Image (tube, coloured by chain):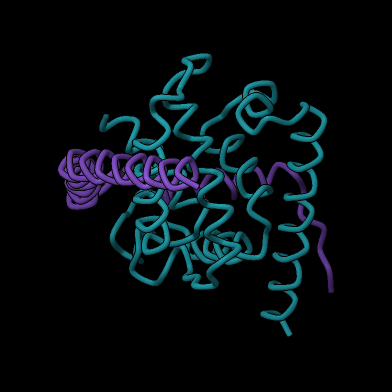
Amino acid sequence: MNSCADEIYGYLVARMGNRFDADDVFQSTFFKVRRFLPSFRGDSSPTTWVMRIAMNEASSFRRHAGRELPLLTPGDALPQSGSDESGYDPVQAETVQDVAAGMQYLQGDLRDVLYFYYYKEMPYMKIAQLIGKPVGTVKSRLFRAKEELKAFLEAHRDNRTQ
Amino acid sequence: MTIERNDDELDQLLREHYRVALDGVTAPDRLLHQVLAETRLGGGRATRWTPVLAFALAGASFLIILASSRVIEVILSL
């Protein structure tokens, strides 16, 4: 149960952008899991089945509520200056924070493919099966997500240098 | 001034972002306990009300049958 729960929780933190909303959606996901467990046919792994429920819950939560907090706040998991002699790069750290900010501007379905591709390192086919869309859609969502993120980062950098 | 960010750099940034934000993230124990406790409570509540509902349903059916038999009796006596 714990590895599945951790998997789902990690996804929800990435998708919702903060732990507060992730907690709420995590709870509603497992209520749904309990409710629909008798209808689980076993044609996918239990984690995949729960992940699909979590994705639906995350989508409907975002439609109904607007609360959103940054994924990375100062003092969050980001390494602090001087805390690590092995390659702490403040410019890199700042840019990583910009990426976290940029994520908030992406639609949920775009965030999903980025997460599965870059963090879970899933192949296109597996992502396609998970989200229930053709491989072409996965590729185009990945492309769009990166283009939007690139535009956000460029605009952010331009503002900073002005 | 706009500088084109190449794809490799963005790929690296995205991986770093996820590593920083999500490595070691686990579902908090209190949340797991809460979910387990509430699902158990929900199930218990439903189980507790089942006999009451069954009894109420049986009672209602009996009354309906009784009322309809009285109606038939009245109609036949006309």
Q: Which residue is drawn at 49% across and 72% down?
A: A67
Q: Residue at x 77, y 26 (%)?
A: A135
Q: Chain B is drawn in which colour?
A: purple
Residue A9 is drawn in which quadrant? top left
Residue lying furthest bottom: A162
Quadrant of the drawing holding the N terminus of chain B: bottom right
Say if residue B25 shows up in the picture. Answer: no
**For residue A62, above or below residue B43:** below
Residue B19 is drawn in which quadrant? top left
Say if residue A73 shows up in the picture. Answer: yes
Q: Residue at x 56, y 61 (%)?
A: A62
Residue A11 location (% of width, % of height): 46, 44
Residue B29 location (% of width, % of height): 18, 47
The residue closer to the viewer here, A32 or B46, is B46
The residue closer to the viewer here, B56 or A68, is B56
Relative to B22, A124 lies left or right: right
* Chain seen in cyan: A
Q: Which residue is drawn at 26% across and 33% down?
A: A2
Residue B7 location (% of width, % of height): 75, 44
Relative to A16, B54 lies left or right: left
Residue A118 is drawn in which quadrant? top right
**For residue A7, above or below residue A122:** below
Residue lying furthest front: B78
Relative to A139, A94 lies left or right: left
The residue closer to the viewer here, A140 or A25, is A25
